[in-house]
Image (tube, helix red, strand yellow):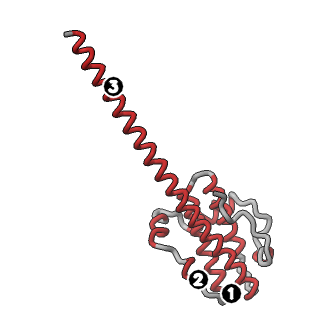
């Protein structure tokens, strides 16, 4: 009887151990997939914003109206790329969003037309729920900035660096 109970106990222990391993592995795999998905989505959003910033730069060259918005957008995008590299995807998205909004203002100020590609998709808008206000975002980007100049004219003919995320 003792041997039978010991075998039954061993089977139960083994079964519980296997179940725990299977659940842990499954959760880890789902987390990795979710993490990879968030990383990919964030990367794509940051890429789209960097293209928007280059478009804003082109419109400033043509229109020659310097609002210092381009410099501010670059500052936000550089910070977004830093956050992305650190794995902080939600904050990277929010900072990149701010950069894109500012850049669209630069394009309009220079009598340009904002490409519909730069408009925010419904999916992108979902990521912005509970985002801090503009001043908070501006303060965070400024605090973490390594930019030498905040004058648009210094970036109109080139000199834009670190606005494209590294994969």
Are there few (<14), some (14-19), or many (20+) residues within 10 Å of tag 1?
Answer: some
The mark nearer the N terminus, 2 or 1, is 1
Are there few (<14), some (14-19), or many (20+) residues within 10 Å of tag 2?
Answer: few
**Rendering quarter of residue 143:** bottom right
Residue 11 rendering spot, x and y as whole percentages: 29, 23
**Could you say which disc has been placed on residue 110 in the image?**
1
Residue 14 to residue 22: above or below: above
Q: Nearer the viewer, mark 2 or mark 1?
A: 2
- Farthest residue, direction top: 2
Q: Which residue is mark 2?
A: 115
**Rendering quarter of residue 149:** bottom right
Residue 97 to residue 2: above or below: below
Q: Secondary structure at mark 1?
A: loop
Q: Residue sitting at 72 percent across and 81 percent down?
A: 58
Quarter that holds the N terminus: top left
Q: Residue sitting at 45 percent across and 72 percent down?
A: 122
Residue 150 to residue 17: above or below: below
Q: Nearer the viewer, mark 3 or mark 1?
A: 3
Identify which residue, 30 or 79, lies in the foreground. 30
Residue 18 to residue 94: above or below: above
Q: CA distance from mark 2 to mark 3?
A: 60 Å
**Could you say which disc has been placed on residue 14 in the image?**
3
Q: Secondary structure at mark 2?
A: loop
**Rendering quarter of residue 69:** bottom right
């Amino acid at each position: 009887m003792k041997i039978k109970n010991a075998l039954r106990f061993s089977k139960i222990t083994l079964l519980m151990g296997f179940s725990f391993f299977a659940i842990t592995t499954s959760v880890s795999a789902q987390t990795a997939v979710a993490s990879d998905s968030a990383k990919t989505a964030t990367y794509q959003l940051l890429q789209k914003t960097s293209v928007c910033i280059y478009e804003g730069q082109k419109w400033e060259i043509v229109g020659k109206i310097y609002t210092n918005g381009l410099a501010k957008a670059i500052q936000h995008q550089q910070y977004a790329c830093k956050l992305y590299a650190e794995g902080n995807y939600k904050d990277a998205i929010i900072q990149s969003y701010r950069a894109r909004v500012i850049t669209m203002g630069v394009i309009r100020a220079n009598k340009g037309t904002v490409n519909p590609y730069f408009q925010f998709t419904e999916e992108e808008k979902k990521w912005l729920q509970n985002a801090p206000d503009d001043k908070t975002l501006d303060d965070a980007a400024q605090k973490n900035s390594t930019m030498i100049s905040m004058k648009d004219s210094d970036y109109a003919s080139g000199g834009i660096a670190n606005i494209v995320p590294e994969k």
